[in-house]
Image: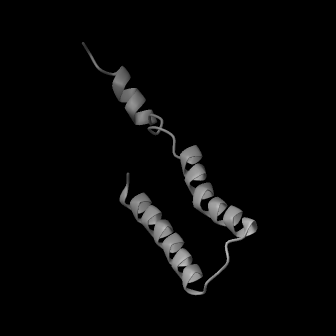
């Protein structure tokens, strides 16, 4: 994982923890609407990251050309 991704994930978890602690401090009631919203806020970014961030990047043109120029 790159440093930026680690920082972004850590910041997102921190924001969620801060929001939960503020809600608990203000005695916010947990309604079904609030529960669905918090579940979506917690899961949607992770799902998007899994869809966007798949495997290794494709080979560059330079890597392909270098692989074909090798002599055995």
| In the image, residue 24 above or below residue 14 | below
Q: Position of residue 64 (x, y in %)?
A: 41, 28
Q: For this view, does 63 lie left or right of residue 13?
A: left
Q: For this view, does 67 lie left or right of residue 38?
A: left
**Which quadrant, please, contains the C terminus?**
top left
Q: List the single residue furthest toward the top.
A: 72
Q: Position of residue 35 (x, y in %)?
A: 67, 65
Q: For this view, does 31 lie left or right of residue 43?
A: right
Q: Position of residue 1 (x, y in %)?
A: 38, 51
Q: Position of residue 61 (x, y in %)?
A: 45, 34
| In the image, residue 55 above or below residue 22 | above
Q: List the single residue furthest toward the bottom.
A: 26
Residue at (38% x, 32% y) in the render: 63
53 or 16: nearer the viewer: 16
Q: Quadrant of residue 39?
A: bottom right
| In the image, residue 5 above or below residue 62 | below
């Amino acid at each position: 994982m790159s440093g930026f991704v680690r920082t972004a994930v850590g910041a997102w978890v921190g924001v969620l923890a801060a929001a939960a602690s503020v809600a608990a401090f203000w005695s916010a009631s947990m309604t079904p609407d609030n529960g669905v919203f918090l579940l979506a806020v917690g899961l949607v970014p992770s799902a998007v990251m899994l869809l966007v961030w798949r495997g290794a990047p494709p080979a560059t043109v330079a890597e392909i050309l270098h692989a074909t120029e090798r002599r055995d």
